Amino acid sequence: MSAASNAPASSYAEAPTRNIAVGGVSYAYRELGPQGGVPVVFFLHLAGNLDNWDPRIIDPIAKERRVITFDNRGLGATTGAVPNSIEAMADDAASFIRSLGLEKVDIFAFSLGGMVAQALIGKHPELVRKLILAGTGPRGGKGMDKIARVTYLDIVRAYLVRADPKEFLFFNRNAAGKKAAKAFITRLHERTAGRDRPVRIQAFRTQLKAIRNWGRTTPADLSTITHPTLIANGDHDRMVPSILSMDLHRRIAGSELVMYADSGHGSIFQFHTQFAPVAVEFLGR
């Protein structure tokens, strides 16, 4: 591991970045919160690195639980090549989790991370206790293969006004959405030292292709997910259509659904003051 301080971090903005080698890949990760119990592992979105997690989501959960975030293979400071399938990403996540000596975890997964989490449960169900799926959809879900087109369009729209693409991809372009987007981007820069490496264009493209293939393949049998599951999204998600969150809820027995009105893909960040307590309660139940 890296020579980062072993002193516990008081916030995600101060959590040291560590490294662990697994099968020739050096995974970059951060952790904070109390030791002991079942940790919560966070699965990243498309083109995300360690700096892309909202501290207003991480910090409330870390007050109660050990929280672990990590860069997927080939992303940020993690070495190796980005896998070309969601299933391979799930295998990588399982290898990383086991490398930390963990036998059971809760998973908090957003967007692409939610797809990886579903594949992980399909291949390694024994690793997972509880699951939070935010802004995501099932394998073979209607419209999943259109994510690449929407993503490229919003990247161009953001470029034209010199904005962060997440402002367009995650938030509605109304007054409330624009305000929430600016606040979210500001929070992502609260960490000023030891920031992660930018995501390379080729890594982003490989992830997009994996998402497209995930959307075009045979629909998953979600009845195999018997883990307690919380699903969350906004009611106007353009990136991963909101109806897919409802589809997940309908097909995962006993799942809970939280939908936020007048919000998009990043609804959990726009409504972090409402959602963080819901997530804490669900995980601690």
Image (tube, rainbow, N blue to C red):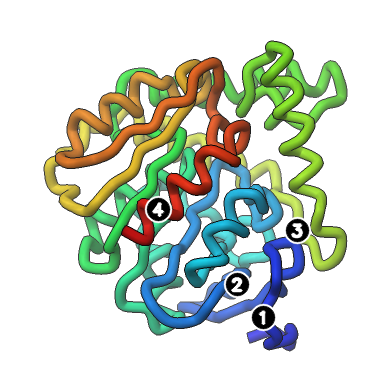
Q: Residues within 10 Å of mark 4 (few under 14, many from 20)?
A: few
Toward which corner of the image does residue 176 lie, by quadrant?
A: top right
The kind of residue on which mark 3 rests is Arg
Q: CA distance from mark 4 to mark 2?
A: 19 Å
- Residue picked out by circle 3: 197
Please provide percent x and percent y for residue 266: 57, 32
Q: Is residue 282 above or below residue 9?
A: above
The residue drawn where x is 31% and y is 72% is 104
Residue 113 visible in the current orientation = no
Please provide percent x and percent y for residue 58: 59, 56
Mark 4 vs mark 2, foreground winner is: 4
Q: Is residue 252 above or below residue 55?
A: above
Check the picture and name the quadrant holding the C terminus.
bottom left
- Residue picked out by circle 1: 8
Mark 3 lies on a secondary structure that is: loop
Q: Residues within 10 Å of mark 2 (few under 14, many from 20)?
A: many
Q: CA distance from mark 2 to mark 3?
A: 20 Å
Mark 1 vs mark 4, foreground winner is: 4
* 141 or 67: nearer the viewer: 67
Q: Which mark is residue 281?
A: 4
Q: CA distance from mark 1 to mark 4?
A: 23 Å
The kind of residue on which mark 2 rests is Leu
- Numbered label tally: 4
* Badge 4 or badge 3: first in the primary sequence: 3
Please provide percent x and percent y for residue 76: 67, 58
Q: CA distance from mark 3 to mark 1?
A: 23 Å
Q: Is residue 20 left or right of residue 282?
A: right
Q: CA distance from mark 1 to mark 2?
A: 6 Å
